[in-house]
Image: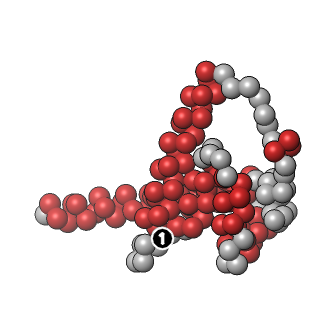
Amino acid sequence: MEDMLLGVVGLVVFLISLVGSTALTAWFLIKLPPDYFVRTPEQRNTKRPTAAAWLRWAARNLLALALIILGIVLSFPGIPGQGILTILLGIMVAEFPGKERLERKIVSIPKVLPAVNQLRARFGKEPLVI
């Protein structure tokens, strides 16, 4: 009986993580401006950080780390899910040097950009420009 309960709990956790990561990834990719990958550093927000900004930075990077780990797990064979897109979402949420170059490299994978632009088109958004 305990084994069956453990299996059910595992299935529920798996389904929640699958649906949650897919929905969060889709939402984030839809909200991106079409020129996200071609903006220069001057076009990005460059405000002086405050204490609240440091807390947001820490929370944002912890969320990014969780998404990257989840994406790696979803990339394993036999585990359905959007592994690469979840990793990409984690990288986009994180803040670190060289992030923009890594994002462009991932999105430039031949199967990723068409999938992202197809998703954006479904919601009436312009395709991403690389």
Q: Which residue is mark 1?
A: 75
Q: Residue at x 14, y 60 (%)?
A: 2
User: Is residue 18 visible from the viewing direction of this image?
Assistant: no
Give the amino acid at mark 1. Ser
**Residue 25 position by quadrant:** bottom right
User: Is residue 36 visible from the viewing direction of this image?
Assistant: yes
Q: For the N terminus, which image quadrant?
A: bottom left
**Residue 3 position by quadrant:** bottom left
Where residue 31 sits in the image (x, y, percent)? 74, 52
Does residue 66 appear left or right of residue 22 in this picture?
Answer: left
Where residue 92 sits in the image (x, y, percent)? 65, 52
Q: Is residue 110 above or below residue 46?
A: below
Q: Residues within 10 Å of mark 1 (few under 14, many from 20)?
A: some
Where residue 15 sits in the image (x, y, percent)? 42, 63
Q: Residue at x 61, y 21 (%)?
A: 51
Q: Is residue 65 above or below residue 8?
A: above
The kind of secondary structure element at disc 1 is: loop
